[in-house]
Amino acid sequence: MSHNHQKKIAVINDFCGFGRCSLTVSLPVISAMGVQCCPVPTAIFSNHTGYDSFYRTDFTCHMENYLQQWERLDLQFQGILTGFLGSQAQIDIVLRFLERFRGEKTVTVVDPVMGDDGILYPGYDPALARRMRELASYADILTPNLTEACILTDTPYLPDMDEEELLRICRTLNSMGPKTIVISGLERGEDLDNFICEAGKPPVVVTAHKVGVCRAGTGDVFSAILAAHAVNGVETVTAVRHAAGFIGKVLRRCLELELPQTDGLCFEEFLPELRTAL
């Protein structure tokens, strides 16, 4: 009996019990968009690291045995989405996973979570950042923020890069392997831009009005929507517009409810809209 009659996306990321980020976000969002979400946890957190305290247990030593069972089941994936990876060992495991499970028609989305505001996240060293380039080469769609795009291309970080500079970075990233680059969350005064560069096409900018403060898990919602749309055959520009509009609507609801910034996006009541947008 085959387990491959439905579309599936394997999502490799940490699992956070509270705070709406990583796998806790990807599972409901991708499922709401009509695709089965198959999580691969890299670590288990009680709540994310933006809180004053948290419990964490690393899952690296379990990942190979976990994935061997999927191989025995002969699982096939229409999409693979990778998020935060905390060690070179995890990158090695993900690279082996891609070699085993990525088919000719599998869409691979790499969110190279490494840093923001021009600096690496705490505990993320330059050697690990260099290994992320190897993983990025497997991507069909790469979704860095500006900091991560600069790190991947050895470009000095400037927060106000113009379109010509962004295009140069994207073409360098294209040359590494990814067909489509989406540089997300570019600060433009009261707006946020998403710079989309597809190989062989002129760039497209999708602009959304800034709503409140940046919240935990926003990037996870964004990448999950893009991955599900890609598997469902939706063009990247359309997917980015939908993701930006959805996130803006949810952010306005967060302000209405006066939710703490750390608690992420209150997307639950809007999940049916993801399905009706297909």
Image (spheres, rainbow, N blue to C red):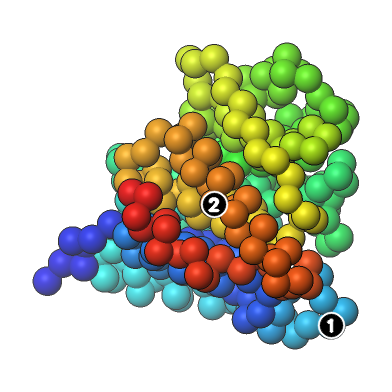
Specify whether 71 is left or right of 253: left
Q: Residue 55: x, y in percent?
A: 75, 85
Q: Residue at the spot x=70%, y=41% of the render?
A: 209
Between 30 and 132, the one lying in front of the other is: 30
Q: Residue 222: x, y in percent?
A: 57, 51
View extreme (left): residue: 1
View extreme (front): residue: 256
Q: Kindly report which numbered mark, 2 or 1, lies closer to the viewer in this rendering.
A: 2
Up-down relation of residue 49 to residue 112 (above or below)? below
Q: Residue 125: x, y in percent?
A: 83, 53
Up-down relation of residue 101 to residue 131 (above or below)? below
Q: CA gap, disc 2 to disc 1?
A: 30 Å
Near mark 2 (Cα within 10 A), the count class, few <14, some 14-19 or many ≥20, is some
Near mark 1 (Cα within 10 A), the count class, few <14, some 14-19 or many ≥20, is few
Between 236 and 46, the one lying in front of the other is: 236
Q: Amino acid at mark 2?
A: Phe
Does residue 175 appear in this view?
A: no
Q: How many marks?
A: 2
Quarter occupied by residue 59:
bottom right
Of the numbered discs 2 and 1, the one sitting upstream in the chain is: 1
Between 163 and 53, the one lying in front of the other is: 163
Q: Secondary structure at mark 1?
A: loop
Q: Which residue is mark 1?
A: 53
Q: Residue 65: x, y in percent?
A: 45, 75
Label drawn at residue 3: none
Does residue 108 appear in this view?
A: yes
Q: Residue at the spot x=74%, y=45% of the render?
A: 210
Q: Amino acid at mark 1?
A: Ser
Up-down relation of residue 179 to residue 57 (above or below)? above
Q: Which residue is mark 2?
A: 246
